[in-house]
Every structure is written in C-alpha cells, then in structure tokens.
Amino acid sequence: MNCTTNNVTDSAASVDEAALYDHLLDYQNVLFLGHRNADPDAISSTFALAEVFGGTVGVVDRCNRVAAIMVEELDIDAVYTPDPANYDFTVVVDTSTRSQLNNIVLGDYGVIDHHSVSQLLDDASFYLHKNTDSNAEIIVDLMRCMGAPIMERTAIALMIGIVTDTGHFKHASAGSFKAIAYLIEQSGVSYSEAMDLLAGTPQELSMRLAVLEAANRAEIRTVDDWVVAASEAESFGASAATSLTGIGADVSFVGTAQDNVLKVSGRANRDAVRCGINLGVLLRDIGTEHNGSGGGHAGAAGMEVSGDAKVVLTGCVDESMRILKGTSREYPVRDGRTREPLQ
Ligand SMILES: [Mn+2]
C-alpha cells in the first residue's frame, strides 16, 4: 500500500489507511454503520466499505429521501436497525456523536469520520479521521491506497455522496474534485450517470404542492431592476423561499404560521448580497422588533416572531427594497472590462 495520510488527530487509536485495512482483516463479520436518517454520504461510505472488505451495510433507523432512492436504484443490500451484538465488530461511519446513532449499544467499534469534532473517537478501538468535505472522499482515498477496483455501483454511490455533502460542490475543496475524477477514471462511470440518478429523485408531493402554492400566491415587488417576493406557505417555507429565488426573485421571504408563531425564511441571491442585503442582520433586527429572534447567513436566514404575517412580511420586503434601491447589480468595471456575474 502506497499512501501518505494527514490524519487530523494523533492518538494511539488513530490509524492510517494501511493500518485500518490490517485491523479490518482481523474480523469476519463486520457491521458498517452510518448515522441516523442516513444520507447519501453515509450510505455510499458504508456500501463501498462492505463491498471492499465484505460485511454488512447497517442503517440505524432509516434513510433520507435521496439515500432511499439510491438504495433502491443501486440495489444496495442494507440491514435496518441492526444489533451490533450480532456482529464481530462495528465500524461507525460519517458519525460524530452517540446520539446520532440513537444511543444504540455499540460494543467494540472503529470509526471512519470527517466531522471536525468527533466525540466517538475517544472510545474507539481505532479510527481513521480526516477533515474532508465528505466522508465518501476518505473512502475513495482508502480504496486508492489499497488499489481496490471500483465497481460501477460503488462509484455512482460515492459520487452522489460527495455531490450532496458538498452542496453540489458549493462547499467543495480540491479533494472533492480529485475524488470524483478518480472515481470516473477507475470505474468508467460517467459523471452524468450519477447526476441522472440524483435528478430522477422526485421531492415529496406535499413539498412540491407547498412550494407551487407559495409561488402562486407570492406578492412580487420591484425597485429599479431588483425583484423582491414574499409569500406564505403552510409548510416547507424554507424550500419555498429557495424556490422563489430560483425562479427569478433576488430576495424572497416566506412566512409559515404555526401555533401563534410566525416562522419566516429569507433567501437572497449573490447579486443582492453583493449590493448590501444581509438577511442574517435584516431578520435579526426585524425579529427583535416583533418580539422574536432571527439570524443566519447573508444569503439565507430565518426568524421566529409573533405577529401578523402580512405586516411582518411587508416589513421584510420594504427593508430589502430600501437597501437595494439605487444600487447596481453590474459588476464594477475593471481594466475596461465588465466581469460576468458569478453564477
Ligand atoms: Mn458526511
């Protein structure tokens, strides 16, 4: 095995890829277990490990929407709510706390994880821990070190794990792209095959209806060439707000009233943020005005207040328009050229 590792932690139980491989050879019947509400990163990691080392893919409770489709489409054999006592050894994957395993009794266990703070490491027999964007990336590295062949299903699963854990590469660093390139080279699977599986994953009907209805009854206002939209939804307010900016609003707010609490989700595109919109600050301030609280990022934030939805949403829209009025979404001219806006 020809590898260099840069493991984050350096305790006795910290192992590199070669040592992990040696350890796993000691056991016959290994359970690879991901976190609760398992996502594609957890499922693809456990699936690839089970393929390479032999063993069982364990799901603590259930899979999330995309992971469930992946299990179905790729025909991944998984054991749901497994009892670690029935296995020689458990390797916990993509998980940083016991509560993420619903406090299941573990016995002896190893860990492969990418979360920066991982409480499970202290009691682990051995662990491979790196600060990568996705856990799948650690698995790709492990397979590369072992020279393990990468099957098509495994490659598609790991690609989806990397894509979803990096928010479709929005938070990706070079390692994610390298891992994707390696998977494509080694398996012969094209990137579009993985994308097809992701794209063919329908949202829940209730979410689609909530989003469409929010768009249908949205109030749309403009100032200069800026578009600000506000609407209400019975549920899925955050998805509705994201969708409103996706279909043309520069800034959007969606209110959801529940038990005398009004939740507002705000979303803003990059142009609006560059021109002064900071939804974290905006919703914090408006939240305080309405006896509640709010906060978040410049482009995505939320608040919970008490008050009339119309009044609160109008306040959010007015404030956004005040900030955007008179600003230009054109990039500043440099060296005589106007830079294309980043997508
Ligand atoms: Mn992960």
Image (cartoon, grey):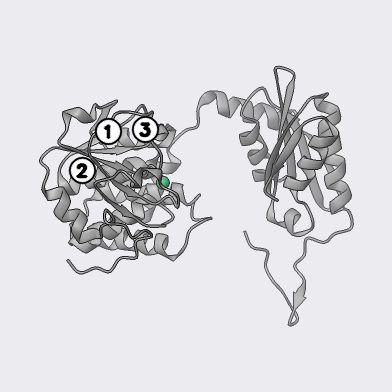
Q: Which mark is residue 106?
A: 1
Q: Quadrant of residue 284?
A: top right
Quarter of the view holding residue 285:
top right
Give the left or right position of residue 331, taking residue 64 as reference: right
- Number of numbered callouts drawn: 3
Give neighbour class at mark 2: few <14, some 14-19, many 20+ (Cα, 10 Å). Answer: some
Q: Report helix, strand or loop for mark 1.
A: loop
The residue lying at 84 percent from left, 53 percent from top is: 324
Pointer 2 residue: 50
Q: Which residue is mark 3?
A: 101
Please identify, in this view, whether the residue under mark 1 or under mark 2 is nearer the observer: 1
Q: Is residue 248 left or right of residue 165?
A: right
- The answer to whether residue 228 of the structure is visible from this angle is no
Which kind of residue does numbered mark 3 sit on? Leu
Q: Which mark is residue 280?
A: none
The image shows residue 43 at horizontal and vertical percentages of 33, 40
Instruction: Name the residue at the top extreme.
Output: 259
